Amino acid sequence: MKAALFSSVPYLGEAPATWPVPADAYSAEVAMTSMQLALELFQLADELGFDWVTVAEHHYAPLSLTPNPAVMAGALTQCVRRARIALLGPTLPILNPVRVAEEVAMLDTLSGGRVIAGMLRGTSNEYVTYDVNPAESRARFEEALQLIVRAWTEPEPFGWLGRYYEYRSVSIWPRPVQRPHPPIYMSASSPEAGEFAARRRLGVGFAFTTVPLAAEAVGHYRREAARAGWEPDEDQVLYRVAAHLAETDEQALQDLEARGSRPSYSRSNRAIDDASAGAGYYGRDTERQRSRLQRHGLRERIELGQLLAGSPDTVLAQARAIHQVLRPGVLEVVFEPVGREQTLRAVELFGTRVLPRLREL
Amino acid sequence: MAEATFEERFVEADGVRVRYLEAGEGPPLVVLHGAGGLRLGGAHHLLAARRRVIAIEIPGFGAPLAAPPASMPELALTVAAAVDRLRLGRFDLMGHSFGGKLALWLAVERPEALQALVLVAPAAVRPPGRPPLPEDPEQLHRLLHAHPERQPMAPPPDPPLAARRRELVARLIGPPREPALEARLPALELPVLVLFGTEDRVVPPEMGRVYRSLIPNCHLVFVFDAGHLPDAERPEAVAALVDDFLERQQGFLVRRRSGLVHP
């Protein structure tokens, strides 16, 4: 199994648990420190042998200071020397797909062909950001993705006569280094997304979920892939999990308890989530999709496979348990922001004492 | 754009009685069908709201001929002679699949007769080693469309007529790459629009790049989520694009649609 280090590049200061989050409590100094720590984590992960470092797109909240993950990935091409740089990803339905194709091609060129192109649909609140109807997000996502692949692979200038996008001439420079194009991943928590990924032979990632729910979703994806006549590579399934490691289990749990629980920004505005749900954003199993975002306590998060917490041995056992159920090729770890030194130590413990043994799985 | 009613008419050329369907007023647009015979898609009806659309039944695809055409260039000249008899002046030409290849022959043989050329899923360049189209109408229907369940199935032609069309296409279509035709494309000065459905399973859309690379003034457009008959599966989109291209030719690259949200 491979390992990725994901950071949403969180803002490390205090802020209210609403969405959108007003900027009156915002401090430029805290933001700069937060970004520097994230860059340090990514570099440390690279040095420790993590296979990927991952950035993502979120808006209007201290959860993430990377509304354009391509900008952060651009910085990473210059300080992450060996690991692949994964965008998981641009939020396609709210973006200009030609621009996304160009940015990923630029990053692939800057990084010497190390980019992973995760393409996401966005959380229920994300459509408010750039004024897009969430009811159209799935159709936009599917069309945008096909347009992006065409922009990467078509040697002649072409026009695109879509339902949501129309271009009279597309011919991007630079082109991706990886041929035919960088590996593509998408979220496949909903059955519709699993079916689309299986039809298009794309990799899938599971985040903001639980191991039992991801097990059902990955099973659905693998069955649909078999029906479409192919079998996903091991690396085409990614599972994202939070983590904190310390020398002992007690210390790790104590660090986490001292920090308290984080607000969940994507659904903290109930009116927006209800309106998106009402518009059909969640698809054919709305209730289950909404329940996977439910908040849990520490012990429950560990049991549900949302959190690895403890000493390196304990975390290895927890990671093995996840592997046994989901068989992901990539375990993507989000280190809990429990304070600068503790977090850096947790990454180091994972990299030196867990990662080498994960490779055997 | 409103639906138009097409009327059946005939014209004599080269001793052949050529059947055609016509609707609309405005600049003339001559349409050449594919291997399945004379067919009008939703886009043709929409185009007839602003243009005089003349959909020709390619000689040999309807009533039997005393002397069947020996080659594509010969057939193209017969079609050109029939159009000459209609006294349209210079006209726009739109060819589908087999009719796209025929339209391309007509364009290289008689470029002075044309204003602009639209090729929809043209069959002049094909990957090697493809099996012929299935004879079973249901199988064919599924192969032609990205969403066969959304399209009405055309009534199957009489088996002898279908067999005669298949024989004609097999004899005339030519090799997957035709050097005699391709050698003449770099000299074609007409504005050309090539359309391919992204889900075309008869002629892969990747063939479109060959036209773009050979013809100096050629524009390639992919029609998202359409199969081999984008005029039927995405009629509004195809009609609007073709109409804009025929009106402004290469100027169609610059959009005129307003982005104003509120005045």
Image: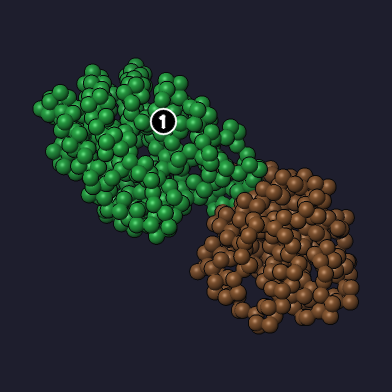
Give the colour of chain A. Answer: green
Q: Is residue A70 above or below residue A141?
A: above
Q: Chain of mark 1?
A: A
Q: 10 Å neighbourhood of mark 1: few (<14), some, or many (≥20)?
A: many
Q: Position of residue B184 (x, y in %)?
A: 82, 51
Q: Position of residue B172 (x, y in %)?
A: 76, 67
Which residue occupies 80% across, 50% down? B183
Q: Position of residue B194 (x, y in %)?
A: 69, 53
Give the colour of chain B. Answer: brown
Give the amino acid at mark 1.
Arg
Residue lying at the far left in this picture: please name it.
A250
Residue A124 visible in this rendered orientation of the protein = yes
Which residue occupies 33% across, 41% down? A329
Q: Classify residue A252 as left or right of residue A66.
A: left
Q: Is residue A175 above or below residue B4?
A: above
Q: Classify residue A167 as left or right of residue B51.
A: left
Residue B225: which quarter of the image?
bottom right
Q: Secondary structure at mark 1?
A: strand
Which residue occupies 50% across, 28% down? A112
Report the front residue among A223 and A189: A223
Q: Classify residue A157 as left or right of residue B153.
A: right
